[in-house]
Amino acid sequence: MSKRNSTALVPAGHSGSVIALPAVGNLDAYISAVQRLPMLSQERESELAARFRSTQDLDAARELVMSHLRLVVSVARQYLGYGLPHADLIQEGNIGLMKAVKRFDPERGVRLVSFALHWIKAEIHEYVLKNWRMVKVATTKAQRKLFFNLRSHKHGTHTLSPAEVEAIARQLDVRGKDVVEMETRLGGQDLALDGQVEDGEESYAPGAWLAAPHSEPVQVLEAREYDRLQGEGLAHALESLDPRSRRIVQARWLRDETEGGTMTLHELADEFGVSAERIRQIEAKALQKMKGALAQYA
């Protein structure tokens, strides 16, 4: 991939040890290969991370890195608008991913995909700032924020009006003249819509890399976790309740229109022969208990 070796990666802090990547001939083949790599379950991820932290097992680190390479490809796509080679963006993101794996602690209850996003983006940000032709001076925190956020805050291709400049400057906590200067720099580079040739390999405009709907790794992982929470997690939480509490929660929150809709506190009070306030207390206690039971699935 570009100027670096595309078949091996060296984890930060592990001189001489490499993590082998798929041996492929071009960027298309690399992306296709990493998209086919299996994703890890939460249990397997925790097991590998714990093994790497305790014994520095590079095989465990390798599996963690490999399973998240598709995430790097996804994040790198977001920075194609700066006109830098996609392969280089991916390589920098891979370095960030390896730094994240080295620092990842599974005991904190956070998935690696969430933890690694910061490190991947930070490494790509550094690369963009150092190499993008139009911006060489975005060195302060405010300038970096403006550089990476102005595009998302600007609607359309028109020049910002004084009112828009003031609003963006206030939102990003920078000076108005800095917004105008950065807008000029961002607008000074045109990105070709047609394919071009870089480093002897064919490359494409950003449109060629648009992902299919709902195929982004982060969205897939979030949807999978949500489905597990709704199914397995909710069933486990309900099983932790006594029959009366379970009946109240289901009647108050889980009944659909085919079952007559949800029930009121007074209807349940009549059913159990207690006051509406007592039903409310039982419901609150049951929801709190369910929240604790769901913690392991969140």
Image (cartoon, helix red, strand yellow):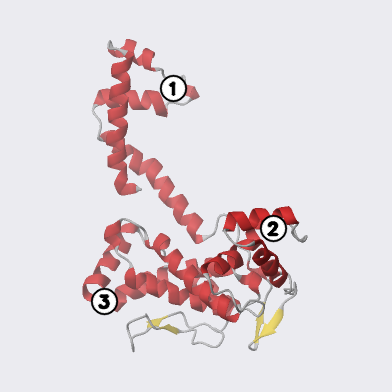
Residue located 48% across and 58% down the image: 218
Q: Residue furthest left?
A: 54
- x 64%, y 73%: residue: 82
Q: Write down the residue under mark 1.
A: 262
Q: Nearer the viewer, residue 152 or 88?
A: 152
Residue type at mark 1?
Thr
Which residue is disc 3 drawn over?
57
Q: In the drawing, what numbered circle is on residue 204?
A: none
Q: Secondary structure at mark 1?
A: loop
State the residue at coordinates (54%, 78%): 127
Depicted 54 relative to depicted 152: above or below: below
Amino acid type, callout 2: Val
- Decide if residue 51 is on the left or right side of residue 12: left
Could you classify mark 3 by the number of other residues whose Cα lies within 10 Å: few (under 14), some (14-19), or many (20 or more)? Answer: some
Quadrant position of residue 203: bottom right
Report if the CB atoms under discs 3 and 1 are less than 8 Å apart: no
Q: Is residue 295 visible?
A: yes
Q: Nearer the viewer, residue 31 or 222?
A: 222
Q: Which quarter of the figure has residue 88?
A: bottom right
Where is mark 2, residue-wise?
A: 165
